[in-house]
């Protein structure tokens, strides 16, 4: 089993990365393979609603990390998406990344890379804006039939530097418990799959309120 942890911060080894490493360590201790995927600092274009992903099976823009991540996602069993907080929301590059990764995988491929796979989000801020960002990020998971993994507090850490994040005892404990919960659910899903259990699904209905 493998979990991909996405570092949505422009700082490769900053506060968001620091929080992710605590989740990663706990997952590794539970026997789960991990990979931290950094979205980098190069520009990530936002979704232009061209709908070419319905024809191609992936985003039409292939000059950044979005398709690279989605290709990896097919072989992953779970995900943790981490972002710093910018103006009480996810960082702009991370928002563009999530928009395109999830939307392109919802056209023509049936959310094959994400559907039914447990996932979680974590937010990193100096002080405030984490709960609004947490809500924003969880919406990608909720619309994609992904079991959302929580902890004993909302998944967030506070600090302006990695050193300050390491002083956030409650935040780090939340990260560790998140890792334990993710490992538990992954093993439960594997056990169910071994028994032949698969979720039933009915055709999706798109309803337009304008008549």
Image (cartoon, rainbow, N blue to C red):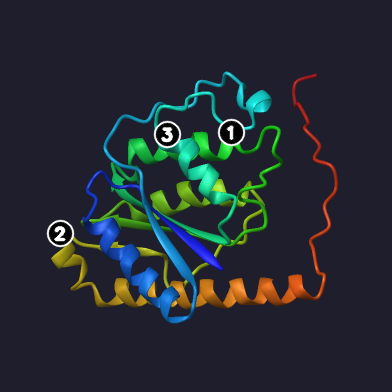
C-alpha distance separating marks 2 and 1:
34 Å
Query: Label 2: which residue?
Result: 161
SS class, disc 1: helix
SS class, disc 3: helix
Contact? badges 2 and 1 (CB < 8 Å): no
C-alpha distance separating marks 3 and 2:
25 Å
First in residue order: circle 3 vs circle 2: 3
Q: Is residue 207 left or right of residue 83?
A: right
First in residue order: circle 2 vs circle 1: 1
Query: Label 1: which residue?
Result: 104
Q: Position of residue 137 (x, y in %)?
A: 47, 49
Query: Could you say which quadrant of the image residue 43 lies in?
Result: top left
Query: Label 3: which residue?
Result: 96
| Residue at 48%, 24% in the rendered image | 61
| Residue at 67%, 27% in the rendered image | 54
Query: Could you say which quadrant of the image residue 194 lies in?
Result: bottom right
- Residue 152 visible in the picture: no
Q: Position of residue 183 (x, y in %)?
A: 53, 75
């Amino acid at each position: 089993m493998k979990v991909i942890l996405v570092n949505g911060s422009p700082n490769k080894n900053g506060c968001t990365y620091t929080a992710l490493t605590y989740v990663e360590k706990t997952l590794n201790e539970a026997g789960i393979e991990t990979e931290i995927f950094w979205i980098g600092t190069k520009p990530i274009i936002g979704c232009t609603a061209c709908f070419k992903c319905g024809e191609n099976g992936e985003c039409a823009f292939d000059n950044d990390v979005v398709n690279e991540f989605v290709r990896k996602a097919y072989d992953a069993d779970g995900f943790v998406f981490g972002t710093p907080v910018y103006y009480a929301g996810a960082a702009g590059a991370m928002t563009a990344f999530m928009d395109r990764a999830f939307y392109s995988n919802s056209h023509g491929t049936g959310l094959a890379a994400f559907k039914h796979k447990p996932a979680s989000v974590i937010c990193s801020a100096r002080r405030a804006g984490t709960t609004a960002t947490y809500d924003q990020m969880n919406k990608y998971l909720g619309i994609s039939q992904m079991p959302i993994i929580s902890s004993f507090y909302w998944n967030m850490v506070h600090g302006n530097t990695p050193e300050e994040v390491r002083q956030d005892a409650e935040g780090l404990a939340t990260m560790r418990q998140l890792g334990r919960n993710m490992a538990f659910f992954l093993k439960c899903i594997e056990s169910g799959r071994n028994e032949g259990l698969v979720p039933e699904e009915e055709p999706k209905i798109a309803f337009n309120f304008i008549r």
